[in-house]
Amino acid sequence: MSRTLPNAREYFKKKKELESKGKIVSVDEAASVKKEIRRYRILKFYKILAVLVVLGIIGTAAYFYLQNREYKEYEVQTDVKREDTVTTQYMEFQGKILKYNKDGVSYCDAQNNTLWAYTYEMQSPTVDICENMAAVGDIKGTKLFIFDSDGNQGEINTNFPIQKFRVSELGTVAVVLEDGDTTWINIYDKSGGEALAKNKTSLDISGYPVDIDISNDNTRVIVSYLQLDGGALKTHVAFYNFGSVGQNYTDKLVSGKIVDGVLFPRTAFIDNEHAVAFGDDRFLIFEGKQIPELLAEVPLEEGEQLVDIFYDKNHIGIVVTTADNASKYSLRIYNPQGNLLLTQKLATDFDRIKIYDDQLLMFYQKQFSVFNLKGVEKFTGTMTRNILDIIPKNKGSQFIVVDSSNTRQIKLK
């Protein structure tokens, strides 16, 4: 069946009306009209392009302004006194505050309003946080609890005492358990129940597990083993794959690296493809989604000692001692491939350094400083009490300051 398109019907109808009135446009006139339409469209295109260019310039200028803007002071927007026990510890969680002690854990906002609370009994509670999941476990005990911003998501009961644990952003937990001269590396779902996977190791063969982490997809675990070989110290950085690939390897051990004479006390998956082992005189970067292999080995300079680490999915940061009389420490930031992005001298002590997207937060006792990732100091100020933690409210100028007795929200000016 043939059809006449609506715009075609309209054209012939209009043409008939014009013919009846003797107003049919000539060929030359039609060409002139088409030319004018074309000129109008080109002019409109360049106007839109000019507007987009101007907006791009304004946006770029605003970005660089915010990146390099310096603040001289701050104003207190809210100031709330807390009534916590002296043993209460604080950690940032999803832009708010996770408070925990031996009796329980609670989640609070900047005004110290409790969003949820959960009670338990622990002797040595420890918290690990990954993205939107938090795990609270009892070191030397047998209980683990998993939380997100809505509250409790599950409970895990282990058969042996907990030595180490790490939670993934999916809520799965990797746990090192002590069983005499044997250690177990078990994987648990956040809902609890039996372990999803188990791996038995012995101290005399594998060594003592110093640290552990789990990948975001829950398939791989990195373990730093301290070993003694005839009285000589060495570290085995080992990777286990609990997925289908690992089933083809003995004890699911798919790769690793042994380093003589160096202790690697910290390990971390910074994303789903890169893992880092931080040692006394170097750090190692591994790459691979199934069988991680050594990508880069970044040594410290002679005489330097590693004193702190920080990282996110795009950056690896270290702080080392320095022999320079003008500065006590040297801060360095690398990308996941091990390329140096920034070196910054630090003349003062610090309690903690944190990285958030494009800025560094550093605090020591009452002093608080903000740097961008080019090393520009954007703010340095003094709070009224010793700082326990700093939590950004946005990328620019608002922060939650948790001090020894109060929670304050401030804005840099």
Image (tube, grey):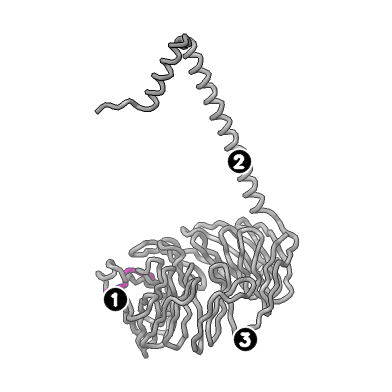
Disc 3 to disc 2, how far (Cα)?
52 Å
Q: Nearer the viewer, mark 3 or mark 1?
A: 3
Disc 3 to disc 1, how far (Cα)?
45 Å
Q: Nearer the viewer, mark 2 or mark 1?
A: 2
Q: Say if mark 3 contacts mark 1, CB within 8 Å.
A: no
Circle 3 — which element?
Answer: loop
Q: Residues within 10 Å of mark 2 (few under 14, many from 20)?
A: few
Residue 85, disc:
3
Residue 68: image x %, image y %? 67, 53
In the displayed structure, does residue 402 sit left or right of residue 236? right
- Residue closest to the eye, 241 or 10: 10
Residue 55, disc:
2
Circle 1 — which element?
Answer: helix
Q: Please, what is the three-letter code of the amino acid marked with disc 2?
A: Leu
The residue beneath circle 1 is: 251
Q: Residue at x 41, y 69 (%)?
A: 170
Q: Earlier in the sequence, mark 3 or mark 2?
A: 2
Q: Which residues are magenta?
A: 250-257
Q: Please, what is the three-letter code of the amino acid marked with disc 1?
A: Asp
